[in-house]
Amino acid sequence: QLQASGGGLVQAGDSLRLSCVASGRTLSTVTMGWFRQAPGKEREFVTAISRSGGLYYADSVKGRFTISRDNAKNTVYLQTNSLKPEDTAVYYCAADRASYVRRTATEYDYWGQGTLVTVSS
């Protein structure tokens, strides 16, 4: 089970840290990803961290967002900096049991409930 939190209403240029706590499975044994879905749009890949700690980012967030994992807390974080209005979306964390990183939402096995990030201009 995955539980995402940390969303909120911020202004452009602000930062937020999203958290995803897992129960029942050690996060270091799966690929963990963050996806987002804006109103009227498809769910899109944001970032992922592989089992070995490799980091992968969508071009739209590279240099602004950082994914990290705390194995002791079984938690994955998404640090979002320099937020833009186009970053407004529901952000979901997800787990993939595959041994390699994938960027397609339908390939992920487990999903959190989502946390809303709203960025005002």
Image (tube, grey):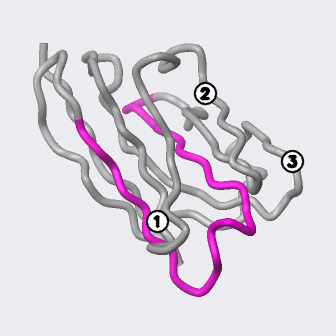
Q: Residue furthest bottom?
A: 24
Q: Position of residue 47 (x, y in %)?
A: 58, 36
Q: Position of residue 119 (x, y in %)?
A: 19, 26
Q: Which residue is mark 2?
A: 57
- In reply to whether residue 35 is colored magenta, the answer given is yes
Amino acid type of the residue that numbered disc 2 sits on in the rendered structure: Tyr
Q: Position of residue 64 (x, y in %)?
A: 40, 20
Assess disc 2: are there few (<14), some (14-19) or many (≥20) residues with their C-alpha within 10 Å of its C-alpha: many
The quadrant in which residue 80 appears is top left
Q: Which residue is mark 1?
A: 75
Amino acid type of the residue that numbered disc 1 sits on in the rendered structure: Thr
Image point (47%, 16%), residue name? 63
Q: Position of residue 68 (x, y in %)?
A: 50, 47
Q: Secondary structure at mark 3?
A: loop
Task: Report the span colored magenta.
Answer: 16-40
Distance of label 2 from label 3 (alpha carbons): 14 Å
Assess disc 1: are there few (<14), some (14-19) or many (≥20) residues with their C-alpha within 10 Å of its C-alpha: many
In the image, 77 versus 87, the foreground residue is: 77
Image point (12%, 37%), residue name? 9
Distance of label 3 from label 1 (alpha carbons): 20 Å
| Residue 100: numbered disc | 3
Image point (17%, 17%), residue name? 12
Q: Is residue 61 left or right of residue 8?
A: right
Q: Residue furthest right?
A: 99
Image point (55%, 68%), residue name? 71
Amino acid type of the residue that numbered disc 3 sits on in the rendered structure: Tyr
Q: Secondary structure at mark 2?
A: strand
Query: Which badge, 2 or 1, comes first in the chain's sequence?
Result: 2
Task: Please state, as top left, top right, bottom left or bottom right, where the C terminus lies in the image.
Answer: top left
